[in-house]
Image (spheres, rainbow, N blue to C red):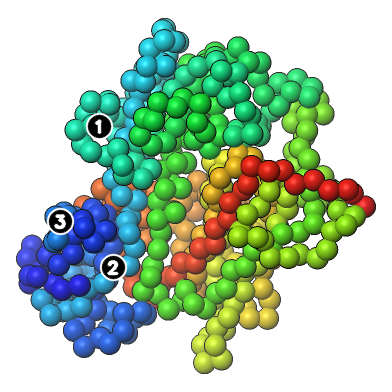
Amino acid sequence: MPILSEVEAGKIKFGAGRIHGVQAGTQVAIYDRCASKFVGDENFLTYANVLEVGEREAIAVLPDEKTNPKVKSVKKDSRLVLTAPTFGGNPISLLLDDASLSARAAGATDVRGEIRKILNAPNNELKTNRLVELTDSAVLQKASRANEPGAILRLRGGRFGEVFPDTSRLRLPDACFGKDNLFPPPDTEIYYLQSGADSGDRKSAPLFGRYFLAENAVAAAEEIIENIGIYTRQRNLINLENKNSSLNDRVQLTLKTIPIAVSPSCQAAEKKPIDLKTDVCNCADGKSAAAADNNQIPQNAVFQIEIKNVSNPKQDSKLYVAALLVSGDGKIKLLGSKDVLELTKENPFKINLYASQPAGAEMVKLIITTKPADLEGIAWLETADAKQRSKGASSPLAQMLNQSGAKTRGNTNLAPDSPNSWGVKTIEWTVAETKFTCACK
């Protein structure tokens, strides 16, 4: 993409805009004019973040020269390429004015008040990192965000049985409602979040398949805010790419199904936790692990992700990976017992996972590095190493996951970074609506 101006006040203009898929928050990489390829660290100068977008042009902000002296070498004849679609994009627009809430009278007023109280509290991270903004339908319509993927969350309310006649779209609860009852009685008042424009269908799938009991406004508001926070981080992680890294081609991800079925049930007042080592049915007619059909995994099935180092003989064979699961039931989870796993050519990793409802898309994002990845500042990722991390530290990865593109792109003090500092590999699958069963051995 052509650079249209010399650097001025730490910014450059380049010749690509909205019609080319550029948006505020997009990351670009700038290479020296003599570069013949745009992968890896050779002739790399700096990253920049898009600040303003027109139809055919955009303006990007460069890091401070003190953190990256190579910024001084950026000229009009330097070479610019896109590396990632967004650093999380714009803040999520949260709507609390749905008609279904008005019909719930005092209870809905209380929960909306509690949500506003939490978001407006000093140092609330969703607000300070510009991850969420409260708005209303009229303002949103003028802002033309209705068609922006994942940009809108609506809070809605209703009676459980009316809103969710089909419980297959819901996640399995953390606790049962008495023996043999996974879900609450049909007349239970609940709240739920939905993503996207108002289609008028209040019975469509709720965000993460989750609902919130209306009996306690404070507890419901806290759970709602927690799930909004997970949603914003998932959104940032899903958009995380580094197309200019040569590390991406050094790791192979494959997905296989395993002839094992899991059957969650309520055996007492609380749901029995699922243990892949014991609560399984090894299928009598099952074969060995096999490739998944179009990466479709039926519910209750166990499947395996293999992470393999495929570096060529001329490359250092040792890599480090952080495998992050983005699940449809509202989780971001590091796979493995430690933050970072050492990956050699001789020892691939095989990780078994369980496909639980709700149906929908899931993925693993693999962060690839040649040295153990810096996860400082991501205290919400739970592993054995989590307690050792500082909330205040700001690794490049933490900046991209913890704040919106609107926050990131205004920051000229981004942590120093280069294409081969880290790579990203993604494997996606869909949890199907069908359930997997088999005769046990």
Does label 1 or label 2 sit earlier along the sequence?
Answer: 2
Q: Residue at x 64, y 42 (%)?
A: 433
Label 2 residue SS: strand
Which residue has dot 3 on it?
55
Callout 2 crowding tier (Cα within 10 Å): few <14, some 14–19, many ≥20: many
Give the residue furthest to the right.
Answer: 441
Q: For this view, does 382 lie left or right of residue 374?
A: right
What amino acid is at disc 2?
Answer: Leu
What amino acid is at disc 3?
Answer: Glu
Which residue has dot 1 on it?
140
Q: Residue at x 89, y 49 (%)?
A: 440
Q: Residue at x 28, y 45 (%)?
A: 90
Classify 407 as above or below 210: below
Which residue has dot 2 on it?
82
Residue 368 image offset from top left, x and y in percent: 50, 70
Residue 208 image offset from top left, x and y in percent: 53, 37
Q: For this view, does 322 lie left or right of residue 195?
A: right
Distance between the alpha carbons at the discs numbered 3 and 2: 16 Å
